[in-house]
Image (cartoon, helix red, strand yellow):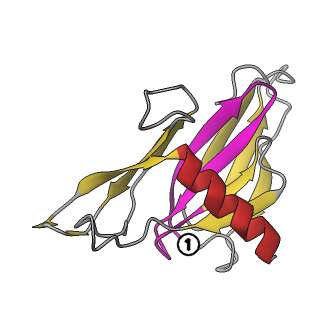
Amino acid sequence: MDDKRQTLFFAEEDRGIWSLSLEKQSGNTTQPQLLAAVDNKILAADIEGLSLYLTGDSGYLIASNQGNDSNAAFSRDGKDFIGQFRVALNMQAGIDGSSETDGLEVTSAYLGPDYPEGLLVIQDGRNRLPSATQNFKLVGWDSVRKSLDHNAIAK
């Protein structure tokens, strides 16, 4: 939910990402708008989570793609695809990548020196290091931003 812009975002697992303007709601005449359809390139079937990373008047809509173990970033309004990223294996730290994600949450709040630009938390449904049913991956927003910047150049 983008409170400032009065827009609700929601995902339909096998169809895509939708928005609904609550500001324009009068007599239930406003219909949801499909912003990004499942195409098995940008969005893979089984979209499980959406969250907004907000900074002033800009930001990103982040979606988890359970179908291909990735995440997609869109402009704050959800209309423009920015890039895709994955939480990958880090053998040195003994951390596996993220897979079978059922959801995520993100904040742009300063959370101390480890997360100065904010934090992305991703549920990991299949944890291998250590072997367990699930855990959560904590990713500093600076890492996500660098990945998105790299993707933007690689397009």
Task: Say which residue label 1 marks.
Answer: 45
Q: Is the residue marked by circle 1 packed among few (<14), some (14-19), or many (20+) residues within 10 Å?
A: some
Residue name at image x 37 percent, y 66 percent: 98
Camera sees residue 130:
yes
Residue 24 percent location from the top left of the image: 87, 24
Question: Would residue 127 appear left or right of 83 to someone viewing this image?
Answer: left
Which quadrant of the rendered structure holds the N terminus?
Answer: top right
Camera sees residue 12:
no
Q: Amino acid at mark 1?
A: Ala
Q: Residue furthest bottom?
A: 40
State which region is magenta.
Answer: 45-71
Residue name at image x 50 percent, y 76 percent: 68
Residue 28 percent location from the top left of the image: 79, 27
Residue 143 percent location from the top left of the image: 54, 54
Question: Would residue 104 appear left or right of 74 to someone viewing this image?
Answer: left
Question: Would residue 96 appear left or right of 87 to someone viewing this image?
Answer: left
- Rendered position, 65 above or below 6: below
Residue 112 percent location from the top left of the image: 43, 27
Residue name at image x 57 percent, y 41 percent: 51
- Rendered position, 86 above or below 124: below
Q: Secondary structure at mark 1?
A: loop
Magenta run includes residue 139: no
- Rendered position, 74 above or below 26: below
